[in-house]
Amino acid sequence: MRWIVPALVGLVLAACGREPAATPEGRFVGVGDGAVEVRFPPDWRENKEEHPFELQWFSGDESMTTGVFEWARSDLAEGVDGEKLLHLQIEDMRGKRTNFKVVAARETEELEGKRLSTLVYSGEKALSKFHYRFTLVELREHPDVILVVLQTSIPSHWGKDEPVLKAITASIRARTQGVPKS
């Protein structure tokens, strides 16, 4: 009987959109106004500090990050599209890192109602080297929204981290339930 009240409170909070929707694979979190959502693994946590993204999450050991930028096409100047925004983000990072080089050429794939265009770079900051995975996400269900995802990992962990980062990006979808921003 004691478990009924906490269970009901949990169900009510989830139904009201106060908690991210959890699954065994992780939890879906809304981006920006919540029209789009992304799933993070269970051990990941939100960065509650100030950052330039609509949302940013860290892996449990903080060896990986995922940040999501979001734009409404209606807010962009004439001639600005997803490609331009992707390249602006890459150039911004290039200006903040040394030895910024291509690790993996552009890869474009169509997945479950979206197009993902990804490029991977490496760069150095202070005494460390990182891999930077930039992905332009265009959703068929929300053609008015443009997302650019920036994910990081260290090169020595890239082999095991890249599939995790790819899965996070592949999970991005139009919101299907009342999921909060984060």
Image (cartoon, rainbow, N blue to C red):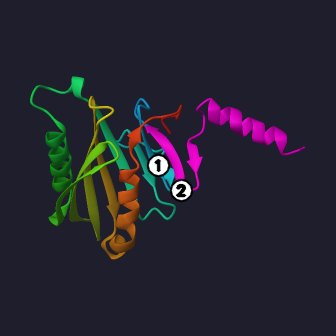
Give the vertical position of 37 relative to 91 (above or below).
above
Q: Amino acid at mark 1?
A: Arg
- Residue 91 inside the magenta-drawn segment: no
Q: Which residues are magenta?
A: 1-30
Contact between labelled residues 2 and 1, with CB atoms less than 8 Å apart: yes
Q: Residue at x 30, y 43 (%)?
A: 114
Return the mark for residue 25: 2
Between residues 67 and 47, which one lies in front from this camera angle? 67
Label 1 secondary element: strand
Where is residue 40 shown, x and y percent of the image?
Answer: 48, 52
Q: Residue at x 23, y 28 (%)?
A: 73
Give the vertical position of 49 relative to 103 (above or below).
above
Where is residue 63 shown, x and y percent of the image?
Answer: 42, 65
Where is residue 160 shown, x and y percent of the image?
Answer: 39, 72
Q: Which residue is mark 1?
A: 39
Where is residue 109 shown, x and y percent of the image?
Answer: 24, 53
Q: Residue furthest left?
A: 79
Viewport quadrant of the N terminus: top right
Q: How many marks?
A: 2
Give the vertical position of 127 relative to 118 (above or below).
below
Between residues 53 and 175, which one lies in front from this camera angle? 175
In the displayed structure image, the side of residue 20 where residue 74 appears, left or right:
left
Q: Residue at x 15, y 50 (%)?
A: 91
Label 2 secondary element: loop
Between residues 49 and 61, which one lies in front from this camera angle? 61
Mark 1 surroundings within 10 Å by alpha-carbon count, few (fewer than 14), some (14 through 19), many (20 or more): many
